[in-house]
């Protein structure tokens, strides 16, 4: 697939995935506090989608928990856009949220004179 087209698909897929996670994970939000979708990457052969997520709390459980919503995400993708084949949804945990949280904690701990 052409690189520009792949970027466009990734952008569209990120929006679809983000909305789907937001709508379907309300009951688990307390467990993770804030779930963010940092990046969505569709393989060039369209066989899988890697969804890079992070959370403030319980990050090690996030991907396992979100895997339960993979079928719902696939169904939403099929409703919104037409692809040659339905890709496999894989979740990857990133530490971007942890880095951000650590930075905020350090800023808050500074004594301003």
Image (spheres, rainbow, N blue to C red):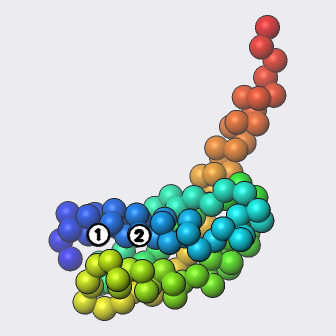
Looking at the rendered structure, which numbered label has been put on residue 110? Answer: none
Name the residue at 58% across, 82% down.
Answer: 69
**Where in the figure is residue 49, as x and y percent of width and height?**
42, 78
Name the residue at 77% across, 65% down.
Answer: 31
Name the residue at 52% across, 61% down.
Answer: 37
Which element is circle 1 on? helix
Does the residue at mark 1 contact the one at mark 2 (Cβ under 8 Å)? no
Which element is circle 2 on? helix
Q: Residues within 10 Å of mark 1 (few under 14, many from 20)?
A: some
When asked about the image quadrant of residue 13, the answer is bottom left
Please give left or right for residue 30 compared with residue 8 in the image.
right
Name the residue furthest bottom. 85
Tell me the distance, in whole angstroms, between the alpha carbons under discs 1 and 2: 10 Å
Nearest to N terminus: mark 1 or mark 2: 1
When asked about the image quadrant of residue 6, the answer is bottom left
According to the picture, the residue beneath numbered tag 1 turns out to be 9
Please give left or right for residue 87 compared with residue 33 in the image.
left
Quadrant placement of the C terminus: top right
What is the total number of numbered labels drawn onto the structure image? 2
When asked about the image quadrant of residue 36, the answer is bottom right
**Where in the figure is residue 88, as x and y percent of width and height?**
45, 87
**Where in the figure is residue 28, as x and y percent of width and height?**
72, 70
Name the residue at 70% across, 44% down.
Answer: 101
Q: How crowded is mark 2: few (under 14 residues within 10 Å), some or many (20 or more)?
A: some
Q: Nearer the viewer, residue 19 or 32?
A: 19
Quadrant placement of the N terminus: bottom left
Please give left or right for residue 102 compared with residue 96 in the image.
right
Above or below, 12 against 75 in this view is: above
According to the picture, the residue beneath numbered tag 2 turns out to be 16
The mark closer to the camera, 1 or 2, is 2
Above or below, 67 against 96 in this view is: below
Above or below, 74 against 36 in this view is: below
């Amino acid at each position: 697939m052409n690189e520009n087209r792949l970027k466009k698909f990734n952008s569209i897929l990120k929006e679809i995935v983000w909305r789907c996670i937001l709508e379907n994970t309300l009951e688990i939000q307390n467990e993770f506090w804030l779930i963010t979708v940092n990046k969505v990457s569709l393989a060039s052969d369209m066989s899988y989608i890697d969804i890079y997520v992070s959370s403030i709390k319980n990050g090690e459980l996030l991907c396992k928990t979100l895997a339960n919503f993979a079928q719902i995400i696939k169904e939403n993708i099929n409703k919104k856009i037409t692809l040659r084949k339905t890709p496999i949804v894989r979740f990857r945990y990133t530490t971007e949220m942890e880095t951000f949280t650590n930075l905020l904690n350090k800023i808050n701990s500074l004594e301003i004179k």
